[in-house]
């Protein structure tokens, strides 16, 4: 294991390499040679490096390998490079690059750490440093887990700085002045006499130099872009003019359009099908059974509409999958696993003596549940695949390009080096695009029609039916109060394992050991309760499940905070004051105090039929508190105001951070109020937005956001806004009505305006 | 079959019951209008027909008659963005951006009919278009700003 520590310390090394027409700056892998993803298309010199910056006579290209699903990652990655490179990203070419192992994501597994994020002891940091090595060894180029900024913060600025200093050295050699006498501005090196030399002019000379790697990153107070309130997203204008091209918008000469109906019972086979009605429909070119990913029948036609119409005319007979057919049976299985010693998965929190505390006197008990949820991003799953004898090309919006590359290579019998995954901007994901069933199906179709680009588009109904959902789960809570304080808190959560099934689908490998997602967001909260226990129970595998924005914390944040709120009310304490008293982590306390001040908190009651709720969850290392105010009107509950406070360590893009936080709250409320997948006959009943209502503008409260920067390090913000929203709303409804809702969606129990 | 989109006349050879959305996207490669649901629930496909906002997924191309179609690509003037587009950029509204063509087309048609809307009228009109990222607070602000700009003239 010695080598693990060594790799962990030497996380990355920025170097340079000559390329056709210029120079590239990027990552050298230190311990193992890593195949270069651009090897196929570039000159020999470039094979030595995986670039973040490429400079040729024709322009400056910034490589932003973390995928953009709407969270602004392309923009912030470009600004991180640009800040040190001294160049406006709007004057550059941006390219996500072709996927390659050297773009591994070191931070993506941090949330699976056996130590809570508030623990910054040396031991905790050592364990986290080892967890950073695992993605490297597996070459895990992945976008997720709010990890882009933590992972890329140093790497990309470092790449920009090495490029800048090396370009300055090239100018120093040319002009015969020392590098220290030169400065840089807007893509140019400026000499002492004010002469400006464009980076593009220096590319060839810089390529011949040893890179200047002894660089010091700029002090944040000197930043020009990062942290500035006026910073704007580089993809904003094209998204407001229709110019932005998502994967679903691409077209190629000779392309045909496919759609598919697969077994609603995921994993079940196709028994037989009758396509006689579809065969003669307009535009239909081919109908075929598809086995890859999820068995079904595909239609290939001259446009997507004809393909979808013909798919709807096919009569399929399915083989049942290996899980229970209905939600009723599924919840029975979840309930059966709670508190069953045989299904104990893990207990990462066990403080005081819960058993002794619960053995005497009155115990407060409550039972909770949450449903399966679809991700339902606006852009349905799609992929374009073209197979020739020489190569496989795949154009798709995805968070997992390397898994796709490996799978397509296996399916086609092609070497992985001949499979090219062109990652496209995504119209949302929320975790949906951590899966690749649609790509496997498109590859199988394209393999049968070599030379023809095939665009497979799932209908919305297909997308909802085959959306590996957020796991359903149940929770049983037991607690006690003493002397007006919360004294004992004991919750047990039962859920099917999530991570092993997902990783198995992508890699064919198994993940041994417990599944942390069962209690992530509940066991790891920064509170000190005298008797405090959180236990995860592993229900059988049922509907195959996956990561959904904020992953385990999406449900566990609701369980933990709502049950805490119940106990606080049992104790007769103030919800905010008691959370503050119990919280033993200074930045988290500050977050709670700040949300109290922002919302003018003076207790949960706001007069007749009005109430406010506070909730807290630390997820992805970000302590986040929210207050929601509601009114109980004759038409139902109306959401009046919401307040969000989070501490992400350092803010790089203030307006986008605000947008991610209120977007997280709205996404969470959409599901807390309105949405669930219920299963009948192995498939979900809700297959389009009319039955799976997201929040609309008229239901959206006024929202105020405040961001703190007192946590050590820097954190991502795409997910932490989600977990506190449902409990804050539920706690507010209790304050306004006296009704405690312990099941999502809340509209099963109370009406909303 | 002939249709006029963004001032340009096109000839397409499709079934008359094919929705305008798919004619635009797959036959004419005009991809600003998006497919989200196919049942007029999300509004990502919203375009203007003779200045009115319609869901292109529900309008059969054969029923278009002589209606002139404008998509997000045809909203701006050659030398300047539409007031609504500029307000969207100023307020940094878009996240994934997939629904924003529909949001902007809805807002532009709405303000054309109702240049001095109240909060409630904005909420009602814009609730027709679904955003899964949750950009609503900035949509609300941007529509207000665009309305103010239009009143300035």
Image (spheres, rainbow, N blue to C red):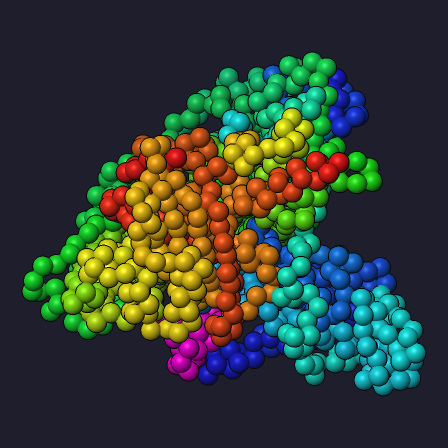
- The quadrant of the rendering that contains the C terminus of chain B is top right
**Where A407 sits versus A113, above or below?**
above
Q: In the rendered view, does A508 fall on the left or right side of B84?
A: left
**Where A358 sits versus A462, above or below?**
below
Comparing B30 with A25, the one in front is B30
Comparing A354 with B104, the one in front is B104
**Where A752 sits versus A628, above or below?**
above
Prevailing secondary structure of the magenta residues: helix
Q: Residue at x 68, y 81 (%)?
A: A216
Q: Can residue B53 be seen in this view?
A: yes
Name the residue furthest left.
A360
Is residue A581 located in the magenta-colored stretch of the structure?
Answer: no
Comparing A243 with A26, the one in front is A243
Q: Can residue A109 be seen in this view?
A: no
Q: Which residue is drawn at 62% across and 66% down?
A: A227
Q: Give the range drawn in magenta.
A: A113-135
Q: Where is residue A151 in the image (x, y as percent from the top left)?
A: 55, 68
């Amino acid at each position: 294991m010695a080598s693990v520590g060594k790799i962990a310390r030497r996380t990355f090394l920025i170097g340079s390499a000559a390329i056709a027409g210029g120079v590239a700056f990027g990552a050298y892998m230190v311990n193992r040679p890593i195949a270069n993803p651009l090897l196929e298309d570039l000159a020999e010199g470039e094979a030595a490096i995986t670039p973040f910056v490429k400079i040729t006579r024709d322009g400056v290209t910034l490589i932003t390998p973390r995928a953009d699903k709407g969270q602004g990652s392309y923009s912030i990655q470009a600004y991180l490079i640009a800040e040190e490179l001294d160049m406006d990203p709007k004057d550059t070419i941006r390219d996500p690059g072709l996927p390659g192992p050297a773009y591994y994501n070191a931070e993506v597994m941090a949330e699976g750490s056996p130590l809570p994020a508030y623990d910054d002891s040396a031991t905790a940091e050592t364990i986290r440093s080892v967890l950073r090595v695992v993605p490297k060894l597996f070459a895990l180029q992945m976008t997720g887990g709010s990890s882009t900024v933590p992972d890329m913060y140093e790497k990309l600025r470092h790449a920009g700085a090495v490029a800048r200093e090396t370009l300055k050295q090239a100018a120093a050699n040319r002009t015969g002045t020392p590098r220290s006498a030169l400065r840089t501005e807007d893509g140019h090196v400026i000499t002492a006499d004010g002469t400006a030399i464009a980076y593009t002019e220096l590319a060839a000379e810089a390529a011949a130099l040893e890179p200047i790697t002894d660089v010091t990153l700029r002090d944040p107070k000197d930043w020009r872009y990062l942290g500035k309130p006026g910073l704007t997203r580089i993809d904003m204008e094209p998204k407001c003019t229709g110019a932005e091209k998502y994967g679903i918008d691409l077209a190629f000469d000779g392309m045909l359009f496919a759609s598919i109906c697969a077994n609603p019972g995921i994993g079940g086979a196709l028994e037989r099908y009758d396509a006689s009605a579809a065969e003669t429909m307009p535009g239909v070119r081919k109908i075929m059974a598809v086995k890859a990913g999820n068995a079904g029948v595909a239609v290939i036609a001259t446009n997507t509409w004809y393909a979808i119409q013909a798919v709807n005319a096919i009569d399929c007979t399915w083989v049942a999958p290996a899980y229970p057919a209905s939600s009723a049976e599924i919840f029975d299985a979840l309930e059966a696993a709670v508190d069953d010693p045989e299904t104990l998965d893990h207990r990462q929190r066990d403080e005081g003596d819960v058993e002794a505390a619960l053995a005497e006197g009155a115990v407060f008990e409550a039972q909770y549940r949450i449903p399966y949820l679809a991700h339902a991003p606006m852009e349905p799953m799609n992929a374009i695949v073209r197979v020739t004898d020489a190569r496989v090309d795949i154009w798709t919006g995805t968070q997992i390009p390397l898994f796709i590359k490996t799978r397509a290579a296996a399916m086609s019998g092609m070497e992985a080096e001949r499979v090219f995954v062109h990652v496209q901007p995504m119209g949302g994901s929320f975790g949906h695009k951590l899966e690749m069933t649609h790509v496997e199906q498109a590859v199988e179709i394209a393999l049968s029609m070599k030379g023809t680009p095939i665009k497979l588009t799932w209908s919305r109904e297909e997308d909802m039916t085959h959306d590996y959902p957020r796991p359903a789960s149940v929770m049983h809570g037991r607690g006690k109060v003493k002397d007006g304080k919360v004294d004992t808190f004991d919750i047990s959560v039962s859920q099917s394992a999530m991570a092993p099934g997902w990783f198995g689908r992508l890699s064919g490998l198994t993940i041994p050991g417990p599944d942390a997602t069962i209690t992530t967001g509940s066991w790891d909260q920064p509170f000190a309760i005298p008797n405090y226990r959180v236990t995860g129970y592993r229900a059988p595998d049922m509907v195959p499940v996956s990561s959904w924005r904020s992953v385990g914390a999406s449900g566990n944040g609701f369980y933990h905070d709502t049950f805490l709120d119940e106990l606080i009310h049992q104790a007769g304490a103030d919800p905010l004051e008691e959370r503050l008293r119990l919280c033993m982590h200074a930045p988290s306390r500050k977050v709670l105090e700040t949300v109290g001040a922002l919302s003018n908190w003076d207790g949960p009651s706001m007069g007749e039929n009005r109430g406010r709720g506070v909730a807290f969850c630390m997820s992805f290392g970000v302590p986040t508190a929210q207050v929601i105010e509601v009114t109980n009107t004759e038409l139902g509950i109306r959401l009046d105001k919401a307040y969000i406070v989070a501490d992400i360590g350092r803010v790089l893009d203030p307006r986008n951070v605000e947008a991610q936080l209120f977007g997280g709250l709205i996404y969470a409320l959409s599901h807390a109020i309105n949405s669930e997948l219920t299963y009948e006959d192995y498939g979900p009943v809700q297959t389009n937005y009319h039955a799976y209502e997201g929040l609309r503008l008229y239901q959206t409260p006024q929202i105020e956001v405040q961001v703190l920067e007192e946590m050590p390090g820097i954190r991502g913000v795409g997910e932490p806004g989600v977990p506190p929203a449902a409990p804050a709303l539920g706690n507010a409804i209790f304050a306004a009505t006296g009704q405690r809702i312990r099941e999502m969606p809340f509209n099963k129990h109370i009406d909303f305006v | 079959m002939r249709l006029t989109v963004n001032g340009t006349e096109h000839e397409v050879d499709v079934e008359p019951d094919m929705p305008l959305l798919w004619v635009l996207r797959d036959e004419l490669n005009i991809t600003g209008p998006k497919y989200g649901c196919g049942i007029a629930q999300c509004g990502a496909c919203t375009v203007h027909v003779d200045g009115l906002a319609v869901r292109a997924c529900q309008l059969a191309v054969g029923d278009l008659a002589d209606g002139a179609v404008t998509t997000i690509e045809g909203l701006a003037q050659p030398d300047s963005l539409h007031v609504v587009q500029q307000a969207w950029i100023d307020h940094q509204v878009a996240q994934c951006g997939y629904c924003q063509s529909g949001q902007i087309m809805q807002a532009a048609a709405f303000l054309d009919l109702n240049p001095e809307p109240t909060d409630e009228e904005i909420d009602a009109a814009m609730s027709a278009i679904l955003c899964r990222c949750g950009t609503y607070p900035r949509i609300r602000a941007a529509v207000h700003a665009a309305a103010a700009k239009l009143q300035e003239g």
